[in-house]
């Protein structure tokens, strides 16, 4: 016949296994979130680079216009 001590040990083991499962699920979810974050950061870096290229082209055009204006 199981005693109260045996029941407490089994109950604590069940709770510990359940908590470990929940923790594992949380860690797995965080890893997925990090992968999505890396993808998003990559997309944002591409957009920033496109914007920077556009800014550089504008600066070149403004410089050319200033040079042509000074030559007249």
Image (cartoon, rainbow, N blue to C red):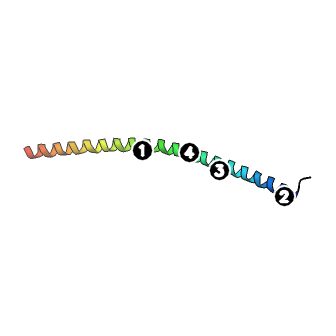
Which secondary structure, mark 3? helix
Residue 31's disc is 4
Mark closest to the chain's N terminus, 1 or 3: 3
CA gap, disc 1 and disc 3: 31 Å
* Of 48 and 67, the residue lying toward us: 48
Is residue 34 left or right of 13 when viewed as pictured? Answer: left
Outermost residue toward the right in this view: 1
> Which x, y percent locates residue 12?
77, 55
Is residue 8 left or right of 52 when viewed as pictured? Answer: right
Residue 5's disc is 2
CA gap, disc 2 and disc 3: 27 Å
**Which residue bears the numbered disc 3?**
23
CA gap, disc 4 and disc 1: 20 Å
Label 4–label 1 contact, CB within 8 A:
no
Mark closest to the chain's N terminus, 2 or 3: 2
**Which residue bears the numbered disc 1?**
44
Residue 59's disc is none
Label 1–label 3 contact, CB within 8 A:
no
Which callout, 2 or 3, points to the residue nearer the camera? 2
Mark closest to the chain's N terminus, 2 or 1: 2
Within 10 Å of disc 2 (Cα), the crowding (few <14, some 14-19, many 20+) is: few
Q: Residue at x 31, y 44 (%)?
A: 52
Mark closest to the chain's N terminus, 4 or 2: 2
Which callout, 4 or 1, points to the residue nearer the camera? 4
Q: Quadrant of residue 61?
A: top left
């Amino acid at each position: 016949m199981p005693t109260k001590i045996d029941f407490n040990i089994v109950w604590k083991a069940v709770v510990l296994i359940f908590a470990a499962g929940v923790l594992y699920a949380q860690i797995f979810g965080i890893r997925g979130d990090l992968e999505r974050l890396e993808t998003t950061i990559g997309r944002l870096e591409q957009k920033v680079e496109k914007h920077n290229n556009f800014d550089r082209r504008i600066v070149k055009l403004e410089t050319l216009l200033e040079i042509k204006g000074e030559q007249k």
